[in-house]
Amino acid sequence: MSPTRIPEATVARLPVYLRALNSLLEADTRTCSSEELAGAAGVNSAKLRKDLSHLGSYGTRGVGYDVEYLRYQISREIGLTQDWPVVIVGIGNLGHALANYSGFSSRGFRTVALLDADDSRTGELVAGLKIRSFGELAAIVHEHGVAIGVIATPAAAAQSVADQMVGAGIRSILNFAPTVLTVPEGVDVRMVDLSSELQILAYHEQRKASATADDGVVA
Amino acid sequence: MSPTRIPEATVARLPVYLRALNSLLEADTRTCSSEELAGAAGVNSAKLRKDLSHLGSYGTRGVGYDVEYLRYQISREIGLTQDWPVVIVGIGNLGHALANYSGFSSRGFRTVALLDADDSRTGELVAGLKIRSFGELAAIVHEHGVAIGVIATPAAAAQSVADQMVGAGIRSILNFAPTVLTVPEGVDVRMVDLSSELQILAYHEQRKASATADDGVVA
DNA sequence: CCCGGTTTGTTCCCGCGTTCACAAACTCTT
DNA sequence: AAGAGTTTGTGAACGCGGGAACAAACCGGG
């Protein structure tokens, strides 16, 4: 009942904390301090405590956090305690990988359909689901109450797919196609840009190389 | 000769600008304003201009930017004018997709080897390359001067793979395994976390849903 | 009951990034 | 040649996020 806004940076870290907590649970750890959890999540302990404080006071001073209880609270905050039906559009190499990816079919998320524009692939079995025609998108979204769509098509098709997703009622899109999507207000798009990540690494690598070269000159 | 530090946020956007410029070039656009380019890249025009100003003064007031010239300057700044050999470790569904992904074999980057710990897959042909044994990592890195490694293994194997990559001399890692990697100082790791992205979308979707529900009560 | 040890939740401060707004600089027309 | 119209590059203000440091709260022993 307290819809206090959680900072975007904190939201982005909650899934990391959740995974760290799952690891701790598998090791039968019942309680943990902010220091331990921060270590497992790869962040500063002060940052962790501040992040968690945005959700409420779920720790005990002098003791730490109850692993299972905290995990439940974070899950609930993210919304993983409810069911999220997902459709994946574009069953090429990447779409195929996503369909099989455990993180996509894990607790909370459920892939309800795989769609592809190439009707010659309709019926093909991938990750236990039959590929269906892209034309069925609206019907599937309506039937299952799909709110999240994943785009794994070539760049050229992505905007058109996004438009039809929005038209069908989808309001959150995870985009793997290397192109900027334009969507109406109220629709969220998160872009996962594989080649950008590589380029960013290359930039830093180049700087490191030239830095050591400079050192060499100096030394 | 001017190793002026470029803000991290700017570096992350340069690949996006680069792609927008490529699109413009394909449409035979010779010149563009900051407004146009910003539109194509999905950012504010002031932000774009400030970003570009960190690279130098490559525009002309009253005119705009020469598309090809700007593209070259950004490419050079990122380091795409040189050759970056890359190894991919873990040829499961995702590794398979990455090997075939054009962004990984595009100008600047070159996949020189696909490695997998499962030796029964050695020799299998993927994206025109034969899968090789993970044990060959050090030799391959040395032979080709590989500086960038991609991890697409299960989470359990990722840290060990990272350790051996670092040991072999790799200093930049792109990690797709859902686990936090610990590496020595001087080594860069970028994490691409597919399930986190979904969870972040779910959080916002949940908030949107409850917000409209509130509206409904009010209205 | 009281006191020392421990750990959370929070306050304060600093630096980065974003945005507005404008001066500087270029083109084109008259 | 001069002025009107454009567009870049940048100075300044603002807000968000990160980190250190500390007060508040809890546990256990005597």
Image: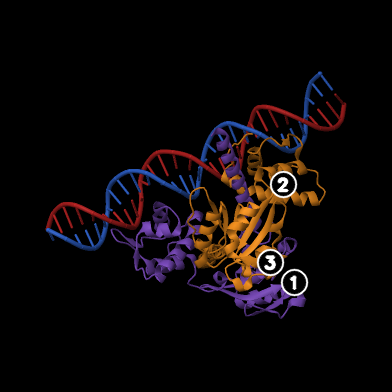
Chain colours: A orange, B purple, C blue, D red
Amino acid type for the residue under numbered disc 1: Ala
Contact between marks 1 and 3 (CB within 8 A): the answer is no
Structural crowding at the residue carrying mark 1, measured as other residues with C-alpha within 10 Å and reported as few (<14), some (14–19) or many (≥20): some
Residue at the (43%, 56%) spot, across then down: B51
Q: Nearer the viewer, residue B74 or B30?
A: B30
Amino acid type for the residue under numbered disc 3: Lys
Q: Chain of mark 2?
A: A
Report the residue marked by disc 3. Answer: A130
Q: CA distance from mark 1 to mark 3?
A: 31 Å
Report the residue marked by disc 2. Answer: A37
Query: Could you say where residue B168 lies in the image, as x and y percent from the top left?
Result: 67, 70
Check disc 1 and report its element: helix, strand or loop.
loop
Residue B117, numbered circle: 1
Q: Are marks 2 and 1 on the same chain?
A: no
Structural crowding at the residue carrying mark 3, measured as other residues with C-alpha within 10 Å and reported as few (<14), some (14–19) or many (≥20): some
Check disc 2 and report its element: helix, strand or loop.
helix
